[in-house]
Amino acid sequence: MRRLRIGVIGRTEMLIEAARRAQAEGHEIALVATCKPSGHELATVADFEALAKASGAPFLRHRDLASEHGLDLVRQAQCDLAISMNWLTLIPAHVRALFALGVFNAHPGDLPRYKGNACPNWAILNGEERVGLSIHQMEDELDGGAIVAKRFLALQASTTIADVYGWLRTSIPEAFGEMVAAAARGELRLTPQSTAPEDSLRCYPRRPEDGKIDWQQPLAAIDRLIRASGHPFAGAFAWLEGTRKVTILAACPVLPREPFLAIPGQVAYAVDGDPVIAANGGYLRLTDLRVDGCVDATDARNAVLSSLRNRLT
């Protein structure tokens, strides 16, 4: 197995862990490039700079990669390949060509079925049976290029986006490690993606306001929205009596024990101090919530439960 010179391009703590694993296997980090964090990562620009310093590798920030200065450093690095995740833009072909084996991206989606942005969130919202992780060789098309590795996590009725990210934090470094090992052995296998339009699903970015709960939606849809919007994201939300924002970070559906009549979003009762809200098809028990103006979780629960006339809208 030969020793590879590896470039690291992107963001997230998962990419840093993948780089450290490659170093532990005897490979050299020859270049590090990052850009401004989106706010969801556990790694900062300073963490990538520290990785570069510890590795004796040049460090580049966003917009430097394709500049004359950046191109000179990439050429001098003479990388065999690059591992990438969450880079802000497509990496131009003339930059990718400077990596002998190419640039390989970790994409949290089952390509080409889920390509683009917020793919794990959309998979939960869509009620999929599983969420995918794809390692692919980057090309000019968004999330295009041949696949070198795939992994899947089964989505259970209680799986949250935090669970998915926990799985990704382990799976991405492992998948990159297997890919680098195969490249070092000269056994890297590239499988072309399907180009059939019916096999592709383009996912677009989501914003915090997309977590607004529509209480007229079925209970299952509201549950999926809450599970897709929690940590590390802003959370689903509603308004208590139209004036105070209620951020719902975790909840669980409760099937009715008897027929009931209530306005969707109405406070129904409490279980162990947790508010239970009437919904379309059952109830929703709020197990982790915040209310604007409340000092703690107990105060927030009490605010919601202060009257059975209270409504979340």
Image: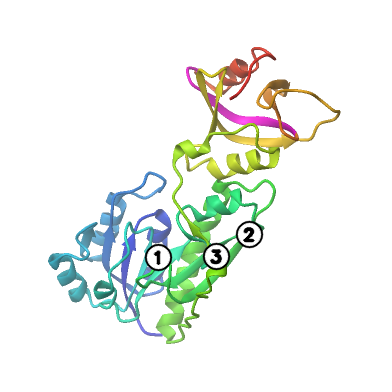
Q: What residue type is labelled 1?
A: Leu
Q: Is residue 284 above or below residue 13?
A: above
Observer-nearest of 202 and 187? 202
Residue at the (53%, 34%) spot, across then down? 212
Residue beneath disc 2: 130
Q: Which of marks 1 and 2 is in front?
A: 1
Q: Place residue 259 in its image quadrant.
A: top right
Q: Which amino acid does label 2 sit on?
A: Arg
Q: Is residue 293 magenta?
A: yes
Query: In x, y percent, where is residue 283?
Result: 73, 31
Q: Is residue 243 above or below residue 149?
A: above
Q: Is residue 312 left or right of residue 49?
A: right
Q: Residue 113, labelled with which disc?
A: 3
Query: In x, y percent, where is residue 264?
Result: 68, 27
Mark 3–mark 2 Cα distance, whole angstroms, equals: 12 Å
Q: Is residue 128 magenta?
A: no
Observer-nearest of 60 and 191? 191
Q: Is residue 24 above or below residue 291?
A: below
Observer-nearest of 170 and 134? 134
State the SS at label 1: loop
Please give the range of residues in magenta.
282-294
Residue beneath disc 1: 142
